[in-house]
Image (cartoon, coloured by chain):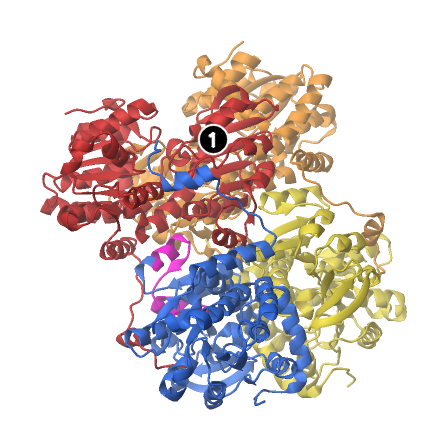
Chain colours: A yellow, B orange, C red, D blue
Amino acid sequence: MDYDIKDLKLAEKGKLKMEWAARYMPVLGIIKEKFSKEKPLKGVRISACLHVTSETGNLIKTLRKGGAEIALTASNPLSTQDEVAAALVKNDSIPVFAIKGEDNKTYYKHINQALDQKPQITMDDGADLVSTLHSQRKSLLEHVIGGTEETTTGVIRLKSMARNKVLRYPIIAVNDANTKHLFDNRYGTGQSTIDGILRATNILLAGMNFVIAGYGWCGRGIAMRAEGEGAKVIICEVDPLRALEAVMDGFQVMTLKEAAKIGNVFVTTTGDKDVISRDHFLRMKDGAVVANSGHFNVEIDIRALSKMSQKRRKIRDFVEEYSLRNGRKIYLLAEGRLINLAAAEGHPATVMDMSFANQALCVLHLYRKGKSLKKEVYPVPEKIDKEIARLKLKALGIKIDKLTPEQKKYLTGWKEGT
Amino acid sequence: MDYDIKDLKLAEKGKLKMEWAARYMPVLGIIKEKFSKEKPLKGVRISACLHVTSETGNLIKTLRKGGAEIALTASNPLSTQDEVAAALVKNDSIPVFAIKGEDNKTYYKHINQALDQKPQITMDDGADLVSTLHSQRKSLLEHVIGGTEETTTGVIRLKSMARNKVLRYPIIAVNDANTKHLFDNRYGTGQSTIDGILRATNILLAGMNFVIAGYGWCGRGIAMRAEGEGAKVIICEVDPLRALEAVMDGFQVMTLKEAAKIGNVFVTTTGDKDVISRDHFLRMKDGAVVANSGHFNVEIDIRALSKMSQKRRKIRDFVEEYSLRNGRKIYLLAEGRLINLAAAEGHPATVMDMSFANQALCVLHLYRKGKSLKKEVYPVPEKIDKEIARLKLKALGIKIDKLTPEQKKYLTGWKEGT
Amino acid sequence: MDYDIKDLKLAEKGKLKMEWAARYMPVLGIIKEKFSKEKPLKGVRISACLHVTSETGNLIKTLRKGGAEIALTASNPLSTQDEVAAALVKNDSIPVFAIKGEDNKTYYKHINQALDQKPQITMDDGADLVSTLHSQRKSLLEHVIGGTEETTTGVIRLKSMARNKVLRYPIIAVNDANTKHLFDNRYGTGQSTIDGILRATNILLAGMNFVIAGYGWCGRGIAMRAEGEGAKVIICEVDPLRALEAVMDGFQVMTLKEAAKIGNVFVTTTGDKDVISRDHFLRMKDGAVVANSGHFNVEIDIRALSKMSQKRRKIRDFVEEYSLRNGRKIYLLAEGRLINLAAAEGHPATVMDMSFANQALCVLHLYRKGKSLKKEVYPVPEKIDKEIARLKLKALGIKIDKLTPEQKKYLTGWKEGT
Amino acid sequence: MDYDIKDLKLAEKGKLKMEWAARYMPVLGIIKEKFSKEKPLKGVRISACLHVTSETGNLIKTLRKGGAEIALTASNPLSTQDEVAAALVKNDSIPVFAIKGEDNKTYYKHINQALDQKPQITMDDGADLVSTLHSQRKSLLEHVIGGTEETTTGVIRLKSMARNKVLRYPIIAVNDANTKHLFDNRYGTGQSTIDGILRATNILLAGMNFVIAGYGWCGRGIAMRAEGEGAKVIICEVDPLRALEAVMDGFQVMTLKEAAKIGNVFVTTTGDKDVISRDHFLRMKDGAVVANSGHFNVEIDIRALSKMSQKRRKIRDFVEEYSLRNGRKIYLLAEGRLINLAAAEGHPATVMDMSFANQALCVLHLYRKGKSLKKEVYPVPEKIDKEIARLKLKALGIKIDKLTPEQKKYLTGWKEGT
């Protein structure tokens, strides 16, 4: 079996880590049990490009139990947990290609190695694997039935491909499931982004001006948690509606140029590029801390920052000090990569449970129905989404009300009024 | 001019009250100015069934300035501000049919009087006027071009009518505009529901078990504000997804039967009937306070409560004490009608500004385009929704960022990856 | 019996209102029961100068049940609930001298009438009765054994009198009891100040800049609740330590001159005078709303505001519009008097329960032990304070842990270390 | 120079870490500058027993710059940052005796080595050094002028010593300074405790039942932050007043036995022993996570837990799994030691700045005035406390208001009333 990981000796630690995560992934656990018995994916070849974390480990094991042949590569050079990679290789015979801190060249080499699997199903997080497949490995396209995509950024790219008639097989946007983005993007990104910033810096957030660019689901989650730490949250947006919501939610809203002057910590989470750039760096106070929580490391214009600096040094793990020519220092975290995966451990298992239950069931759905689908981006089937919500609630031991027949009828009638 | 109101002498107070509200309605103000110049609704006959509050007064005046002929009736027997009714009649020559505390018979008589206007456009809040028109006044249907609907409950009824092929003209669901329901239902209902409960009871919410049935936009708003007062919020839901969101938002989630045993205050906001009923009343603690913030007074089963009680008396304005046979007392607020409109003054002007800007622009849209529409429920045109967000932000003096051409391009591309 | 109130016919409404409040005053209820049996204050003459609210009504009735002869006058011209005054006169034969909206002359006439009682014990809230007694009615001082004081401002005045050797009898600072100021000043003032502002204005607080002058217990309570409504809270302070706490609590801290430029709503709660004055009014935005929640109406410099204005009119109950010469309008609430008592109903019964349980037990303590005390300001005896906390928790049905003997011992030892 | 640390090669990393912390310690920075010039502690021998963190490093360097001769030892076996220890030895020639993870025997050996310095001043955090000095090294007592104590637990022990007439020299309770405990214990412990739990477990706190034993300043800080992460906070207390505050702050309050049944995460912060013991472990749900944030590792009865377990294994760093005989698993974090120091990095520099500014100035105060003090526990001189608040605010660039002469006069008068 081919693989490329840091160190096989880390396997035991990785195994325990996955075991710990599994405690918080009861819905995936139910699916795993079912898959073990029924083997519904027997022999199906899958190439997966996902953050190699303990939660992903549990997803991969679930698919494996279902009979699939999977190759796994990282969806970000900094997000791999090497011990998990080791455990998957050693204990579960999964070919993994991922090393934390790998350079861009290795990153793409690994994607290609995962593609050598000749996938029938692709699983992607950011669409790097899909775009590699569509540009450099076109010959493999004939094998592919369909794919899943985990994150907002990937969905945006894939919809653009579909719009441009470039997309060659159907994709299910797992990201857009309610049981995914309402939880993972909000509560997951919220907690883990703050976690990443604190592990990297150990600064006190109470009383800080905490600037967030982007008030989508991720931005809201971060805002909620930053406020929960006592920070004064400032939101920068380009969409008037979201900006209005931020105002009514009690946050200060201003342009990033204004925010640059007063912010202590900055986080980008927009899905767009050059959100924080030269003009903003110039206005920042000495000591400003800058991090990214969006999918790609393009949100902060690092090249501009480098050019403006006369010196650069690492002052703590994941904290790089840029000494600007104006005498001020700016601290960039985790090289502008996803701070929650680079400096912390990514989304907690509790939310990934639902995201990955969606992944597992959508892979099965694609395998069964993919051939009847068009070369477009599809939502997660509503039935899957709802079932996952129901199972999660049950796993948490929470009971809710049921509509009576009279109440159901009332909701569909129109005659009863005042 | 025909009208039926409490007392014309209240007009001066109503005028000042509308003036005060207008300060917080800048977007409607811009539309009013434009309408005054252009008279785009010259001679258009409108029958409006809305809560007769100072904010509605400003909407009616705006349409009047645009040239419309409007008759106004109340959309709830308890929600009329008599001074506003008086001012509209006396100063603006609007035929108003609404008296706070009118009985159900008068309520429907007033709706019929407003319909005597032979409307080309209807404006409704809960669909009582539309359903009266479709059942008792069918002969008037021939004049109608279209209508607008303000609230969730009304939209549900109208969609049911459309589904059953009963609806005879197109309706725009103003409620579903982002600039309406995200603000009015959430921040408006949130603040004003608590306001109504406090005006009625003057109880301290800190430390109370505050039970909310329904975690839609209204329920979320109420939960946010109840927590903001220091209460311990408990959510009851029938939808697993919403229940999960409530859990992750930090609230306790349980069935209403469980919540009944520990709640101090109960608020319904579901759009359904008999949400709190006999079984729940039986479990409640002595002194439980029960209120409704949903559109109709059907959410609390008052008949059941009456039957269970051996005595009933009014202990404060809007607080009725029911002495149950089990020896406990339950306090029903505002006869189970919308607590925020009955005991307080409904949604603050700031949010109604956007809701009613949508109303004004949708009336115009219907007048111009209504004949080309089908007999269905339509969303607010996206252009109107977005423009209102933009104007509101501007009126608040808040500046936001703009995408650069490069950023726009990036968002529509797919080739740039890691 | 002599008395001076608005209207005896309001008595029934007042009786019900007190009955309602009594539901939320279980600790006072326990004391009342005990007093009824034991009559420990038989024949004791008391002059009480307190806000005449339904909660105070319950305190007065408790003392009366204990055998005391009490005359009651208002501690603020705007805070009287006329129906409560009527009920106390009619049903409980208490001589009350208090009419909501009385002018300053009548206010002091009423204080003098209450003093005609020749009190052995005084109960005060702001020290107006005590200072009248010490300046105009010195001959009565010989009868007095001691007094209680309810509020921070009164305690400050009385301590100043003691320091200047002017105070002629011992006072217990009820305000300083933990079970008083930690609850009443924080949760009571917090909720009721917001309540008063909303009843007066019906504005949406979400998204507003809400400026609070003073970050003592009252200011903290208001800040907590304003944030709970979605407002952006700005704190102005003179004490560096409190200012630092406000910063760390996540609020913006700045000088009032800076805050004046951006605030939408201003509330003073400092205990000092001229906190908002000419310089601040000049900087305020058009439409600024200004209110006071401190004891006296001196915190806002109303004279300066009047002088700067060319016009003044009442636009809503408790909202006065001042048209400044610079073209802007400023809205003063409740004539600068305690907004929570003037426009709303003061502190909810739940917190007054503890404050007034302290009052009742301190009156008894003074009657029994007053002669052995010096002419100084005393704290509430710790035993009383602790017992009230215990009773309140019990009344709420909440059980807490107890230290084991080993744990008690550990806490007093020093030898066990790492 | 004698020393005992992990590895001198870590010095460069420690130096950078201290440099980073220094950015957030401006008040200590001002003192350091002054000390560098004036050398007010020239030749003074100090033995310091403190958590060896980057913040402490900056304090030690400040005292060194002031001329002091300091030996440093750890105040907890798990809290040492080995890189900081290395930097202090290598770059600043400070004799340090501290290795992360040292056993109890080594811990006390190191304390003794620090005492070999024959201190004139002691600095302690938990009073282990002081109690060792008073029990095993009495001969050294003759040299000692005075000491400082950093934490609540230490102050409790020292007051007990003073009460028992055992204390042999004056101690200043740095912990009790307002600029210390209101910030460090609340915001510092709050953030860093959550940080420690997340680093150890990576669990999602949103929706969890988070049980906190103890609602002192530390407990409040933790409650605030746990709620800020979306957890449902449950408070257990023995003091009725604090319990009532917790209720009004919106938290659930119950006995630990009740909480044990529903909690997902437990944190102790009481200063007492056996807070969580056998009876509680027996009631806990499978998967319960248990941590301590109080000074000593006695709050959780680990011996009882061990006895009840049939198996024990480490599943992640700082997470130990105990398999109970009843089939459930309980996860103990960081061996029951201070979770924020063991699994995270302790209090952020921003709050330690004020705590350690108090330390530095109190050491100087003791050196100058100690001989005139009694053998008691003293508060930090008010002048020092206030000056630190002023300097901190200035360093944060925040301006506050000043009282006018008229306002000062008003506050000390009593004649102006209603």
Quarter of the figure with residue C285: top right
Q: What is the x, y in percent for residue B199? A: 40, 35
Quarter of the figure with residue A69: bottom right
Give the magenta range.
Answer: D242-270
As drawn, which residue projects farthest toward the top? Answer: B1
The answer to whether residue A117 is above or below residue B115 is below
Q: What is the x, y in percent for residue C341? A: 37, 34
Identify the residue at horizontal 79%, vertical 84% (top origin).
A2
Amino acid, disc 1: Asp
Q: What is the x, y in percent for residue B10? A: 45, 16
Residue highlighted by disc 1: C301
Q: What is the x, y in percent for residue D274? A: 36, 76
Q: Secondary structure at mark 1?
A: loop
Kindly identify which chain the residue marked by label 1 belongs to. Answer: C
User: Does the magenta-highlighted stretch encompass residue B73?
Assistant: no
- Residue D335 or residue B366, whichever sits in front: D335
Quarter of the figure with residue A288: bottom right
The answer to whether residue C256 is above or below residue C306 is below
Quarter containing the N terminus of chain B: top right
Q: Is residue C384 left or right of residue B256?
A: left
Identify the residue at horizontal 69%, vertical 77% (top origin).
A67
- Residue D240 or residue A125, whichever sits in front: D240
Q: Can see residue C416?
A: yes
The answer to whether residue B348 is above or below residue A297 is above
Identify the residue at horizontal 19%, vertical 45% (top origin).
C363
Instruction: Report the number of discs.
Output: 1
